[in-house]
């Protein structure tokens, strides 16, 4: 029952945050006017685009709410990670040493798999926060931040292959097998040419 209450409270909080941002969003013209005043370097063709919509429009409430939600999620995640670490490494449980060692290895691998790509997401978002705080606009850095966010899936996959031994073993076998097949094809082609030349 406690888990249901916990998940339900998180779901309601997220829905209310997103709903509030949507309900209090300004009309399109107010958003365009606000953006022209704050970021005069953005071309008019982008601001006047019919698909343009500025949710923030100089209000500090949506970023504040979003930031609070991120902090709340971070605190919850930190609690679960710390509690799991405590239970795995600092308490004696009625399981075999081998099982406990396997659980510890798996936990460390999962922590690495989650942490490394998370850094790739946190840094661009931190840049966006600083840029928003100081009203700084630089399209080149925006593009780099968006590319870093977009590469998160690739980074997650690469880290997963590196930290988990079965994936690492399979990928290395697959790569080696591909090179072996190619070298056999090349050698058979060369053999065929040699036979043709000698005959």
Image (cartoon, helix red, strand yellow):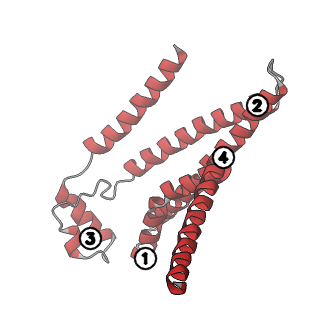
State the mark number for residue 164: 4
Q: Position of residue 52 (x, y in %)?
A: 22, 61
| Mark closer to the observer (2, 1) | 2
Q: Are discs 2 and 3 less than 8 Å apart at CB?
A: no
Q: Are discs 1 and 3 less than 8 Å apart at CB?
A: no
Residue displayed at 43% across by 46% down: 66
| Mark closer to the observer (4, 3) | 4
Query: Which residue is at the front of the view, 102 or 191?
Result: 191
Residue displayed at 61% across by 50% down: 170
Q: Position of residue 39 (x, y in %)?
A: 33, 71
Q: Which residue is mark 2?
A: 88
Residue displayed at 50% across by 58% down: 154
Q: Earlier in the sequence, mark 4 or mark 3?
A: 3
Q: Within 10 Å of the Cα at label 1, are there few (<14), some (14-19), or many (20+) other Cα atoms?
A: few
Distance from the alpha carbon under mark 2 to that under mark 3? 54 Å
| Mark closer to the observer (2, 4) | 4
Distance from the alpha carbon under mark 4 to that under mark 3? 50 Å
Compared across the picture, whether 35 is left or right of 188 comes to left
Q: Within 10 Å of the Cα at label 3, are there few (<14), some (14-19), or many (20+) other Cα atoms?
A: some
Q: Position of residue 181 (x, y in %)?
A: 56, 63
Q: Can the viewer see residue 170 in this picture?
A: yes
| Mark closer to the observer (1, 3) | 1
Q: Which residue is mark 1?
A: 140
State the mark number for residue 36: 3
């Amino acid at each position: 029952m406690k888990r249901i209450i916990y998940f339900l409270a998180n779901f309601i909080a997220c829905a209310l945050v997103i709903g509030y941002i949507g309900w209090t969003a300004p009309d399109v013209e107010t958003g365009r006017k606000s953006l022209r005043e704050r970021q005069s370097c953005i071309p008019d063709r982008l601001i006047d685009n019919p698909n343009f919509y500025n949710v923030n429009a100089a209000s500090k409430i949506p970023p504040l709410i979003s930031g609070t939600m991120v902090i709340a999620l971070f605190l919850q995640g930190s609690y679960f990670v710390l509690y799991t670490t405590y239970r795995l490494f600092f308490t004696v449980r009625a399981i075999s040493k081998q099982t406990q060692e396997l659980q510890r290895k798996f936990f460390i691998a999962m922590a690495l798999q989650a942490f490394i790509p998370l850094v790739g997401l946190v840094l661009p978002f931190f840049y966006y926060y600083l840029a928003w705080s100081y009203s700084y606009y630089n399209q080149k850095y925006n593009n780099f931040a968006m590319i870093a966010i977009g590469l998160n899936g690739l980074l997650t996959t690469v880290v997963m292959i590196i930290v988990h031994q079965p994936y690492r073993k399979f990928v290395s076998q697959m790569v080696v097998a591909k090179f072996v097949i190619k070298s056999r094809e090349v050698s058979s082609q060369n053999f065929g040419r040699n036979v043709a030349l000698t005959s």
